[in-house]
Image (cartoon, helix red, strand yellow):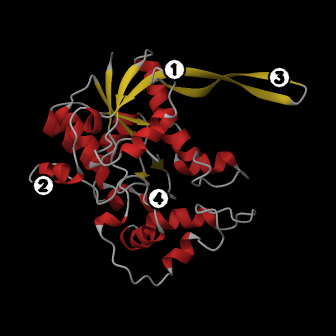
Amino acid sequence: MITVNSVSGGQTSAKLMVDFPADYNIFQLVRTNNPKALFMKGKDEKTRQLISDRIGFEFIGTLEQDTCIYTILDLEQFTGQSIKINTSKISFDEMIAEHGTRCLPSPLRRYCTEELKMKVAFEWWQENVNEIVEMRIGYRANEMSRMARKLKTCDKNRIESFKHVIGFKETKKGTQQIWETTKFSKPVFPYIENKPTWKDDIQKYWKDKPVRFAEFNNCVGCFHREPLLLKYMWREENEKMQIFSDFEKDRKYKNDTFKMDDNITYERIKNMNLTHHLVSSDFNECDSGYCGI
């Protein structure tokens, strides 16, 4: 079976490339066209052009921390393996605009994960493999509950499917989408099933290696993050957090915020007086190579 390492830019999925080399390594890049998030604030146009060339169109910036781009490039140099940078044809901003009056993404409406991560990986699979693959995910030994939840989405043979649009048809009610469900991957968890590995093990390994990692993984304004971490992100990534906050403004539906609560808007989180000090154990990192589970 063809093997694929799902790389997020975090330390755990990066370690998969070292311990379990695969036929393919893939990284799903979430883009924004908002100039507030210009990569490295315009201070590294060479790297921005490099990424533009690799994805096939102009790369303005990402809603993750910019260091994630250096992580991918450093990993390629360190491991001698290539990483395919996949990205949607639409940016995060365009996705929100496309949905129009539809509610913002939230823990119960995770269409950003669907559109910008899962669909992107599936389309890469369709174009390059088109047979069931072994998809390696970097859950650690203490994350068996995450593995269990993931496996519940699979069939009895542990195969995961993806539901996607294959066409359109005209009906009395107008144009409707034609959907198909395709089996495409068998998720495996090497750091639980093959080589039980803990967070400390991962951190110790990367401590003296020439690979740069972002402080946190995935989008800086991800709705899965607790207010404490989002408040911290306002300090560290103010311009990007403002992009998320702007999306919440002028929404016409009650509780149409990333947290699904008008009392917990990102603007309010920005102005919260939090006395608790953020430490790395206060949150669940998204460094496994799989978003939002």
Left/right placement of residue 30 relative to residue 96 reads left
Residue 225, given in percent of the width and then of the height, sits at 46, 61
Q: CA gap, disc 2 to disc 4? A: 34 Å
Amino acid on which disc 3 is placed: Glu
- Look at the picture and state if 269 lies above or below 4: below
- Eye-nearest disc, 2 or 3: 2
Q: CA distance from mark 4 to mark 1?
A: 38 Å
Asked if residue 222 shows in the view, the reply is yes
Tell me the CA gap for discs 2 and 3: 58 Å
Classify mark 3: helix, strand or loop.
strand
The answer to which of marks 2 and 4 sits earlier in the sequence is 4
Residue 207: numbered disc: 2
- Find the distance from the CA under tag 4 to the CA under tag 3: 40 Å
Viewer can see residue 210: no
Q: Which residue is mark 3?
A: 170
Residue in the picture at 29% in, 48% down = 10
Amino acid beneath label 1: Lys
Residue 292 falls left or right of residue 78? right
Residue at the spot of label 4: 35
Q: Earlier in the sequence, mark 3 or mark 1?
A: 3
Name the residue beneath numbered marker 1: 183
Instruction: Give the mark toward the camera: 2 or 4.
Output: 2
Q: Which numbered disc, 2 or 1, marks the residue that appears first in the sequence?
A: 1
Q: Residue furthest left?
A: 208
| Outermost right residue | 172
Q: Which numbered disc flags the more N-terminal residue, 2 or 3?
A: 3
Q: Secondary structure at mark 1?
A: strand
Q: Position of residue 63 (x, y in %)?
A: 44, 55
Query: Are the residues flagged by discs 4 and 1 in contact, CB closer than 8 Å?
Result: no
Please, is residue 7 above or below residue 206 in the view? above
